[in-house]
Amino acid sequence: MHFNRTILGVIVVLALMATLMLTGPSITGYVATETFSKPLNIQITESQRYFVESDADIALSALALSGTVEGDGLVNVYLTDKEENRLLVFSNKAKSATAMTHITGLAIVDVKLTAGKKLDIIESLDDAFVTTSGSFVNQCEQTCLLDPSKFNGNKFTLDFVVEPGTEFTITNVRYTVAQS
């Protein structure tokens, strides 16, 4: 009985090896990435555009922010891709019945944030939602997994839409870069 198991095991291993040799091994779905973190101290009290800039071209595959919100106003932060599509990075809105606090979390090829033009945008809040204030860490609503082909280059746009009377502070930006 033990002899039959051994022969069966050898046959299975040989069959797998033959299959790999004939079809060739291949790995799919793996993309090499590197994650970076940059401490910041940027205070934003009105809607404004910022630029994330790097000295070299990078392919962004994730972006998250950490910081604090003080006040009762709505704060939304958007990352814009090459085709002018906006993805939500952070929002301090929560369902009225389940106002949850934000979760803590994470790492940057050196980038810098520079202020752009003021934005004449104020967004409203649906009655089913409330705003939350306090600290948040590594928030990435729609930017936890990005398509690097749409976010490559050395300059990216972040739009901060901040309701008057609210102070939004960014303490850290964390992003992941796909390696070529």
Image (cartoon, grey):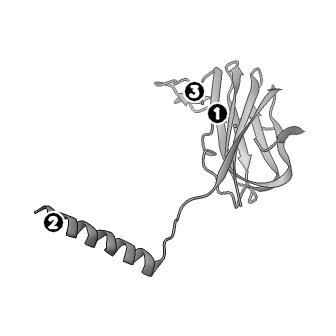
Residue count near mark 3 (Cα–Cα under 10 Å), binned few <14, some 14–19, many ≥20: some
- The alpha-carbon separation of the residues under discs 3 and 2 comes to 59 Å
Residue count near mark 2 (Cα–Cα under 10 Å), binned few <14, some 14–19, many ≥20: few
Give the mark count. Answer: 3
Q: Earlier in the sequence, mark 1 or mark 2?
A: 2
> Which quadrant would residue 151 be assigned to in this image?
bottom right
Residue under label 1: 106
> Which quadrant would residue 65 be assigned to in this image?
top right
Compare residues 22 and 44 and report the one nearer the observer: 22
Q: Are marks 3 and 2 in contact (CB under 8 Å)?
A: no
Question: Can you give x and y, in whole percent of width and height, for residue 113 in the image?
Answer: 84, 38
Element type where label 1 sits in the image: loop
- The alpha-carbon separation of the residues under discs 1 and 2 comes to 53 Å
Please state which amino acid type lies under the numbered disc 1: Leu
Horizontal arrangement in the rendering, residue 14 relative to residue 122 (left or right)? left
Residue under label 3: 102
Residue under label 2: 3
Say if residue 118 shows up in the picture.
no
Question: Can you give x and y, in whole percent of width and height, for residue 122 in the image?
Answer: 74, 34
Please state which amino acid type lies under the numbered disc 3: His
Q: Is residue 15 above or below residue 154?
A: below
- Mark 3 or 2, closer to the camera: 2
Horizontal arrangement in the rendering, residue 142 relative to residue 82 (left or right)? left
